[in-house]
């Protein structure tokens, strides 16, 4: 591998890691924006997106690579079903674990969130076992520079990278448009900025909160499925690791800020790719969290966060 | 040669493996477990085209399990995964105890024992033998604590007990003196014995 | 039957007994003012009408229907909207988006466009700034936005909590003119003010609230003559 090839490869790795981290980070930041809760169980919703989509593929009898209309029908169908499941699940978690504590001190729902996270992880372990889980290689992998463009390079960029970016980026754009332009999106921003004033305008805060949990859960579920298709592997603890990095992304970007969460996700993705390469992967976590601390010291509200604690 | 580390809860090692790939390494060796990282490394080595480029993957006894090809894919691992294991190949077990164990295990469970089965069988042999040898002291002991101490003393004194893979002797630190290793290569859907390696790591 | 009626309403903040049996009415076609010094319970009264607080005792009816247990967002749908104390506009929504939020429960697109136009006619300054974020407006403009936003729900009754607070005398004049204009266009108003002088000029009837109790109620003419009111609220000695 030449230095140029390596650099391009690192950029590709950074973008791919970043794109699913960003998708998960959105759920942290949206929920925080509305109810100032760090939903620790969010990473596990991502993990359950992996497990649920895997189960759905199993029910459909999919074990190997598909092609043609069958591929797209299965992908879109399973993705929508997974989004629905993880969205509803996230909504249910809010209903059971956070809503009863809406008026309690902030520490209380934070603790139920940690508890929820442990519960989901352990349920997943009982459901799917503690070992690595193989995810069928549904999406055909074609080496684009070498096999399609006829180049001779060591850079690996495949149709799977295209799938990953092609799903995550449009979803992020879609979410931004949803928040910017729809009535519900505006109501979310209004509620995040001033919940009481929003209620005085006829906005049902609980409905907004439910919608937020649903959307965040659906996005995390999609991330779980896409990572399954992309890495073909997962584990009941995968949500802990990705959740930690995604949460860091959200804080880095300015928690509560949707654009910030996406930026933060890509930032951490690149940081991971370059740190693994030029330092050592043992140091990557240290680098990530040191960066977080530095950003918070010099810009306490994150890269894009407002100075006031309210956001969206 | 280079050294690096991984988080056991991580599942995405592509960034690290890109570095390994770029370094031109011939072999990735790691002390992995089946349920934390090992199979993922193998799978992503395959996805990055490293096996095709001739890089091999080597790990220890915790990866000597059917779970690995099940979790990755037998095709990807074919001829690319080496594991070490502290016993000779199952059909070459040198002791009577070992041969009996292998025969009975197969009859009862209708399949080959994995590494851990042999370890636990050996452990049980040691415990039973220690109790047997400590019997007079146990009878003489005044209280439960003394009985336990008697068994422990007998256990550390274990010498040339016939285990599954050869005689078992502990040194003063409680380590096994006479470990015998063998190396396997995953090929055509199973682990194929390659050679024995003695405890002092010299190939035989 | 009165449009709005509070009957012996008691409200608590934990142990603090903030309203101790408040009764008042607002009829169609009226501006009624509620005056009182800081901490008297004026804002609490409006919050309770809007459903942000629920009375422990007593009842609130809107055209005969009980609303004291209704959630705040439903109270808006039933026709009561409030421009709260301190304006509480959405700082990072544009002026236009703030107005749209006022019309949140409505689905008549054409009617909403019409009402935005009506608000812009009342407050031409807002039209110029309609793409600007609410937080970048001056205090007076924010107050206009808060009132405009409340109007967007087409309320049967408009609640205003200290609309003159923190504004320059000229802006206070403007705001009170607009309050009269809104009233003239047919919206009854319950106006909470510390600026009794102005409030008594625009309203027809008034109530005086002291530490959670209504101590006086009368026409504004009589209130303006009242010895106690003159001393305590009109700054006369
Ligand atoms: N959120 C609150 N928590 C506790 N006490 C409150 C709260 N809001 C108001 N109060 C108390 O209730 C009383 C009435 O307050 P308020 O209705 O805001 O008065 P006003 O609007 O007339 O100035 C005051 O004694 C005030 O301290
Ligand atoms: Mg007040």
Image (cartoon, grey):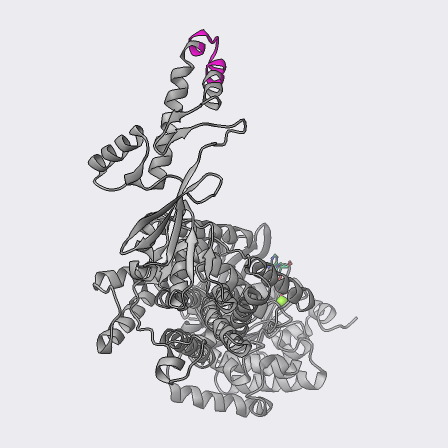
The foreground one among B57 and A110 is B57
Majority secondary structure of magenta residues: helix
The residue depicted at 63 percent of the width and 83 percent of the height is: C137
Magenta span includes B140: yes
Quadrant in which residue A218 is drawn: bottom left
Q: Is residue A296 visible?
A: yes
Task: Report the span colored magenta.
Answer: B137-149
Q: With A301 as the anchor, is A119 left or right in this view?
A: left
Residue at 62 percent of width and 84 percent of height: C141
Q: Is residue A52 left or right of residue A161?
A: left
Rendered-image quarter of ligand 1: bottom right
Q: Position of residue A40 (x, y in %)?
A: 48, 56
Decide: is C168 above or below C52. below
- Residue C177 on image: x %, y %: 61, 87
In the picture, residue C1 is in which quadrant? Answer: bottom left
Q: Quadrant of residue B197?
A: top left
User: Is residue C213 in the magenta section?
Assistant: no
Is residue B61 shown above or below B77? above
Q: Is residue A95 above or below residue C117?
A: above
């Amino acid at each position: 591998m030449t230095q140029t090839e390596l650099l391009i490869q690192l950029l590709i790795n950074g973008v791919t890691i970043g794109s699913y981290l960003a998708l998960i980070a959105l759920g942290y930041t949206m929920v925080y924006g509305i109810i100032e809760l760090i939903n620790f169980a969010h990473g596990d919703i991502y993990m359950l997106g992996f497990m649920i989509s895997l189960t759905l593929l199993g029910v459909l009898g999919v074990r190997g690579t598909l092609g043609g209309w069958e591929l797209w029908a299965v992908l879109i169908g399973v993705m929508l079903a997974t989004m629905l499941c993880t969205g509803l699940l996230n909504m249910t978690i809010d209903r059971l674990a956070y809503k009863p504590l809406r008026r309690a001190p902030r520490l209380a729902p934070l603790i139920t969130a940690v508890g929820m996270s442990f519960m989901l992880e352990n349920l997943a372990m009982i459901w799917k076992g503690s070992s690595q889980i193989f995810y069928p290689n549904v999406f055909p992998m074609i080496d684009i520079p070498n096999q399609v463009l006829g180049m001779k390079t060591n850079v690996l960029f495949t149709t799977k990278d295209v799938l990953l970016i092609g799903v995550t980026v449009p979803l992020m754009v879609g979410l931004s448009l949803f928040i910017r332009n729809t009535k519900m999106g505006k109501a979310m921003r209004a509620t995040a900025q001033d919940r009481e004033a929003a209620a005085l305008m006829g906005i049902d805060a609980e409905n907004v909160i439910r919608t937020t949990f649903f959307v965040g859960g659906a996005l995390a579920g999609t991330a779980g499925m896409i990572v399954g298709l992309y890495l073909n592997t997962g584990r009941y603890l995968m949500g802990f690791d990705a959740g930690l990095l995604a949460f860091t992304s959200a804080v880095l970007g300015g928690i509560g800020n949707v654009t910030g969460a996406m930026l933060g996700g890509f930032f951490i993705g690149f940081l991971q790719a370059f740190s693994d390469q030029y330092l050592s992967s043992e140091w990557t976590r240290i680098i990530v969290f040191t960066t977080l601390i530095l950003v918070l010291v010099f810009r306490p509200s994150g890269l894009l966060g407002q100075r006031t604690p309210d956001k969206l | 040669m280079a050294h690096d580390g991984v988080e056991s809860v991580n599942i995405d090692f592509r960034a690290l493996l890109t570095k390994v790939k770029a370094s031109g390494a011939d072999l990735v060796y790691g002390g992995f477990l089946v349920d934390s990282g090992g199979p993922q490394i193998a799978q992503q080595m395959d996805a990055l085209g490293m096996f095709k480029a001739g890089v091999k993957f080597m790990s220890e006894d915790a990866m000597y399990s059917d779970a690995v090809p099940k979790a990755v894919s037998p095709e990807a691992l074919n001829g690319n995964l080496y594991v070490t294991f502290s016993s000779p190949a199952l059909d070459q077990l040198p002791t009577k105890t070992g041969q009996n164990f292998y025969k009975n295990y197969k009859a009862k469970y209708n399949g080959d024992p994995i590494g851990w089965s042999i370890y636990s069988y050996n452990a049980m042999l040691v415990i039973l033998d220690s109790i047997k040898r400590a019997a007079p002291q146990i009878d003489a002991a005044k209280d439960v604590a003394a009985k336990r101490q008697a068994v422990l003393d007998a256990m550390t004194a274990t010498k040339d007990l016939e285990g599954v893979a050869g005689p078992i002797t502990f040194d003063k630190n409680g380590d096994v003196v006479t470990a015998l290793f063998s190396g396997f290569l995953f090929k055509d859907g199973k682990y194929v014995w390659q050679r024995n390696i003695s405890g002092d790591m010299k190939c035989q | 039957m009165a449009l709005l009626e509070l009957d012996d309403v008691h409200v608590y903040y934990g142990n603090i007994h903030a309203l101790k049996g408040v009764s008042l009415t607002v009829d169609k076609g009226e501006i009624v003012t509620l005056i009182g010094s800081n901490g008297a319970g004026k804002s609490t009264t409006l919050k309770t009408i809007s459903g942000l607080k629920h009375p422990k005792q007593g009842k609130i009816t809107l055209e005969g229907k009980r609303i004291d247990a209704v959630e705040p967002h439903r109270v808006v749908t039933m026709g009561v909207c409030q421009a709260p104390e301190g304006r509480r506009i959405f700082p990072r929504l544009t002026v236009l988006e703030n107005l749209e939020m006022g019309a949140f429960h409505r689905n008549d697109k054409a009617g909403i466009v019409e009402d935005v136009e009506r608000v812009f006619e009342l407050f031409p300054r807002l039209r110029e700034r309609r793409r600007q974020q609410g937080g970048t407006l001056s205090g007076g403009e924010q107050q206009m936005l808060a009132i405009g936003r409340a109007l967007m729900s087409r309320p049967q009754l408009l609640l205003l909590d200290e609309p003159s607070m923190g504004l320059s005398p000229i802006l206070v004049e403007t705001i009170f003119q607009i309050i009269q204009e809104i009233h003239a266009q047919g919206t009854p108003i319950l106006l909470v003010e510390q600026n009794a002088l102005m409030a008594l000029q625009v309203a027809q009837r008034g109530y005086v609230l002291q530490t959670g109790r209504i101590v006086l109620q009368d026409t504004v003419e009589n209130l303006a003559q009242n010895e106690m009111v003159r001393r305590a609220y009109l700054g006369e000695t």
